[in-house]
Image (cartoon, helix red, strand yellow):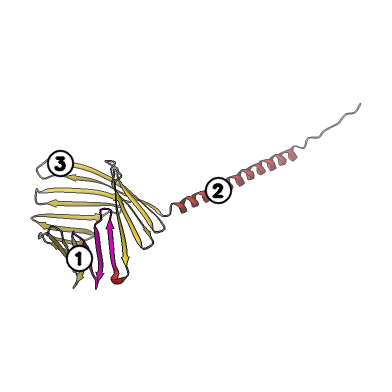
Amino acid sequence: MRYDVHIVDRKRDKKISKMILILSILKRRITMKKLIALTAVAVMASSAAMAAVSLSGTASVTFDDNGTATNTTVGAASMTIAGSNGSSTASASLNLVTGAMTGATMATSIGPVAVAATIDSAGAAAVTLSLSVLAGDVTIALDQLGAATISSTVAGVALSHTLGGSTTGSATLAGMDVAITRTAGGTTTWDVSTTLNGVTLAIDEAGVVTASMGLAGNTVTITNGGATTVSVSRDLTSGANLTAGYNTADNSLSLVASVTF
């Protein structure tokens, strides 16, 4: 009768078990590294595809004591998305409070012809075609209703005239920005603005005078047009903006906290 005797080497078995465990861990790590690498590639590809898309928005809360009337607190929030592909662009804004879409625009070019369109919340579109003429830097624009607009800039003076409609002109003369508009009905509006010693002054045809200046880190704006309004605005270190306003028409004080991203 034969007997086989097996000698158990526990130290050897422990080493083998450790080696198997280490190989298993290394295999999992290699697999995880592959997953991380694949994820990084996917994120980079996604970022590259979305590189021409931007998202921005703003939110604000306004408190107004309304003088002797009842105090009111109103909130507002909106978001804008814009994108481009080559020479074509599109953008739209969404009011996050009412859900209404505004400012939906699209622009592209077909050869020398530029195409611009605006779209309202109901889907109705207004389209304008424009052609730049090389002679004299003249641009001729035609909308979907057949209204033609001719515009040009000569010696720093920008002129625009819509056939059968309004005429506008703007220029910078002796350090003053001048803008004039003449409507088809014969009404003329104008405004003049200039900056003196850090104070920007503006006046229009109605006699409304506005002064804006920087003061101790704040932006102060004073407007006098019958009633006087004063607003003081400051950007906070938190990224928000705080604006305080006073109106002599009803002796009201308003406070606006807003965030823009």
Q: Is residue 227 above or below residue 159?
A: above
Disc 2 residue type (three-letter): Leu
Comparing marks 2 and 1, which lies closer to the viewer? 1
Most extreme residue toward the left, as rendered? 226
Q: Is residue 65 left or right of residue 104?
A: left
Question: Local crowd at mark 3 within 10 Å, few (<14), some, or many (≥20)?
Answer: few
**Residue at point 84%, 32% (across, down):** 5
Q: Which residues are magenta?
A: 138-164
User: Picture coordinates of residue 76 (x, y %)?
Assistant: 25, 44
On the image, numbered disc 2 is attached to which residue? 38
Q: Is residue 58 left or right of residue 229?
A: right
Q: What mark, if any, has residue 169 been given in the picture?
A: 1
Q: Earlier in the sequence, mark 3 or mark 1?
A: 3
Disc 3 residue type (three-letter): Asn
| Magenta stretch holds residue 149 | yes
Q: Secondary structure at mark 3?
A: loop
Most extreme residue toward the front, as rendered? 146
